[in-house]
Image (cartoon, coloured by chain):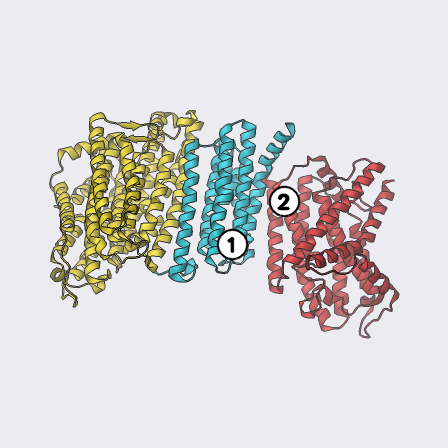
Amino acid sequence: MGLISLAAAKTLASSAAFLFITVLLMAAAKRTATCIALFSAQCAIITAQILATAYLHRSGEGYLVAVLVFAVKVVGIPYALLRVVRGLKTAGEVDTSTTPAQSVYITAALIPLAFVVVKPYVRALAVDGQLLAAAVALVLSGAFLMVSRKKALMQVIGLVVLENGIFVAAITTTSGMPLVIEIGIFFDLLIGVLLMGVFVFRIRDTFEHVDVSKLRRLRG
Amino acid sequence: MTLWFSLLIPLLGAFAVLACRQPRAAVRAALGIGALEVLTLGRAVWAIRAEGVLQSGRYLRADGLTAFFLINIGLIFTLVLAYSVGYLRHIPHGRFSSARWFFALVFLLLFTMLGVYLSANLGMMWIAVETTTLASALLVGFYNTEGAVEAGWKYLILCTVGIAFALFGTITLYLAAIRSGMPADNALDWAALMNWAPQMSGARELLKLAFVFVAVGYGTKIGFVPMHSWLPDAHAEAPSPVSALLSAVLLNCALYALLRIDAITARAIGSGFSHTLLLALGTLSVVVAAFLMVVQNDLKRLLAYSSIEHMGIVAIGVGLGGSLGLYGALLHTFNHSLAKTLLFFTAGHVRERFGTLRMDQIRGMVRSLPWTSVALIIGSLAVVGMPPFGLFVSEFVILTAAFTQAHYVLAILLLAAISVVFGAMLQHFQGMLCGEPPPMGARAKALFTDVAAMTACAACLLVLGLRIPVVFTNLLHGAMAVLQ
Amino acid sequence: MTYALNVLQLMLLLAAAPLVRGVVACLKARIQNRRGASVWRPYAELRKLFAKEDLVPPTASPVFRFSPVVLFAATVAAAAFIPVLNGSALLGATGDFIMLAYLLALGRFFLILGAMDGGSSFGGMGASREALVSTLAEAPLLLGLTAVAITARTATIAGIVRWTLAQQVFHLSAVHALALAALALVAIAETGRVPVDNPATHLELTMIHEAMVLEYSGPSLALIEWAGAIKLSAMMALLIALFVPWGIPVSLSAVGLGIALTTFVLKMAALAVSLAVLESSVAKLRMYLVPDFLGMACVLSILAVIFTALMR
């Protein structure tokens, strides 16, 4: 069992690194399907982190939360998003208002910014500074994705990455919220994503495109 | 038990209405379920008045503040149901835009809003607020036109992002509670947090951070100014009864959540920081909304900006605090819902008659829609804060609070903004009411339900402006006692 | 004894270099559903070229004749810094990773000079493109190596290898992940593979490296080809040594050497497979996008250096 606890400790220590890598890769991605796969990988890393914490703290609830995260975020939401992508039948590229390189530059600048933002709270809260910084970096890069991507579905992906960041911040600082609340939050998120998928189809049917930068009719 | 019933009736009612194939059967079912629900809410308020606090299990709780807002939602919901019966005659029939879907979605929205009001646990409250966004998004995009879909999308995305920040704030609050020693399984329960709050005074920075995120998050849903850009679109493109429901009830719902968390913060670290933030957000909202109202061209967008302005006034009232400020703020939420409902009902009639909501194309309402014009005049006088109506009283109380606490600059800004609003509305409505109406067909017969709904609104506004009934004042004082 | 071992590992890199190229080409062919040439073809090509005559353009200066020699010498010297079979290399000094980067740059500089000296317009075009690519690739190379060196608290490549061997296997840090990503991108640019440059192209306007060597023939061309192959296997061996050196024995023994050789072959095979898959699945970038590609590598390596401070 020593090997498993070693593996758990190392998973915890390196999950922040993996999260930063997925953030950078998502900024450079050129296709929507790639972004969805990267989001799924991100949630898989978070599941591994929850499993490692649950093993090290011997909490049964943690395993349940890990299963839930896997079912909803690794399988459920990416599957729903992929179905929308396939159903839209438009080209699968990510229309960006910045080139992939510029997106990577901005996202790479956001990562040290996340560390700076987190610094005053790390000592006060006595938590792993890297994971908290990874959470803030996820939030910032999710917001950046929402702002710089022109396709409606990419805004949804940016939104779920942002919520991912908040979730990672929650599990890093607290040892988990009450189970009922966690279940409620996950299913809320799932229904929200499904509803946004319905809306993307409506946008496509009404406007004949899914480019949100062209939705500028209502202004002032 | 009453609490469970008041939640279950709209939920099951939504499915029941969906099951009715015939539109007339759906309308009748909706009216029946609505009546049942309003009776249950009345019973709940009566029970709260008798017992003080109703608790059902760990997650449902209703106290004085809940009772006040339940009266608000019950009244507005009745009026909206009554008005919808007539309004539905004019909805173009599509696969998803039929009467039964309308009522089903409205009942779902009611279910989620009641979930916010009745939840004892801050986590459940957050889930319920998020669900109100989801439930109302389909209502905003109900007409499936370009504007409606764009407004629905903007609403969905912006409010979900905002509410995600509110989640972060709630988690930070939970963290502060646990770090100061509170047992974890109770640390999201509002009553337990209020009891524990004095012992959280050590976690100043965390609580300030939590409040900032909650103010930004729930403030997005309330419509405070930097985060308001979804509000004019959503309230303008939705069907008129839904706009009334959104402006009158949903904004109050989000405000309720903010009030609950503000109470905890105030008890823990004092209200200096949180109330300053609320004053800033409120003043910004009032000033920006007032100036934007001058340049509006669409009637319902004008009314939406008016909602932003009034929510700003409420925020100023809460931020001033004390017995005067809070009294004025709570009274203002009630009065504003009545006035805004009346105005959106008139907007619905205008749209029906003139075919458009563009104020430069609407002329001569006095001649073509006489009774609606009367309602419009009453509503507009009420909403700018003119004396015989309720909003004058609540705004006066808030201004008194401002002068008492020596916030002179704030009071002057508020008065100036209200004057700008008065001028803007006068100019727009005068253009619409006077002159020769464009050539149109015969007027549709006014339904009894419409007339009854609008008269009820005007009557309540008048009563609250002339002499607030003692029962109501007691209710208000009960609500304030909960927060202090 | 260590000295003989280091000479042996240098010989191994030199001798196996054309084989690595052949394996990658064969794998690419199989992935693209062709049969492809045999894996020993680069050796046959080198033998053929060494036997041929060396034709020199009449307008060329002596630079044209000795730049292939300088390129080959510099590349061999660079390869001598990399530990393969044990925890040290033939050449090693404090700060030798900077020396490695600049030896590669020296070779490239003379290749550029020779290409321009050949007098053809394609040579000049290839030279200017190569100058752009190598200028942009230099910063991420040095920064990536610096980040790894700071983490290992030594300044020699052999020292980095010894430090990494002393860590536990699961010890992956963000610094290493980012530095690996940056150095992998730089390796692709330095060795002229897809997506930066297609080594198998026949269209002169898309060439970078090939355009520079259009004028060369005979033994000069053989030296250039061999130097290119050595550069590829040296970069691959460098990535293996810096990031996944497990298998290299700390103490010398026959069994340890056998294990080291086997693991080295396996790791090179894995890298060759991934390179072949990458080359078959990604399209070559247009020239104006290559600075973006290298800019990303630069940003990743800067982030790696920043992380050495943040992770403390």
Q: Nearer the viewer, residue B299 or B133?
A: B133
Q: Which chain is yellow?
A: B
Colour of chain C in the image: red
Residue B109: where, in percent of width, then height? 30, 44
**Mark 2 element type:** helix
- Please indicate, yes or no, whether residue A128 appears anywhere in the rendered image: no
Q: Which chain is cyan?
A: A
Callout in the foreground (2, 1):
1
Tell me the quadrant of the picture where the N terminus of chain B can be found.
top left
Position of B238 compared to B156: left or right?
left
Residue B376: where, in percent of width, then height? 16, 54
Q: Which residue occupies 28% across, 55% down? A: B236
Name the residue that disc number 1 marks: A32
Q: Amino acid at mark 2?
A: Ala
Residue B379: where, in percent of width, then height? 17, 51
Q: Residues within 10 Å of mark 2 (few under 14, many from 20)?
A: some
From the viewer's perspective, is residue C288 above or below residue A11? below
Q: Are marks 2 and 1 on the same chain?
A: no
**Could you tell me how many numbered marks the image carries?**
2
Residue B138: where, in percent of width, then height? 34, 50
Q: Amino acid at mark 1?
A: Thr
From the viewer's perspective, is residue A74 above or below residue C122? above
Position of B194 compared to C248: left or right?
left
Task: Give the quadrant of residue A100.
Answer: bottom right
Tell me the distance, in whole angstroms, between the alpha carbons under discs 2 and 1: 24 Å
From the viewer's perspective, is residue C103 above or below residue B406? below
Name the residue that disc number 2 marks: C177
Q: Which residue occupies 25% across, 47% down? A: B245
Q: Chain of mark 2?
A: C
Q: Nearer the viewer, residue B8 or B271?
A: B8
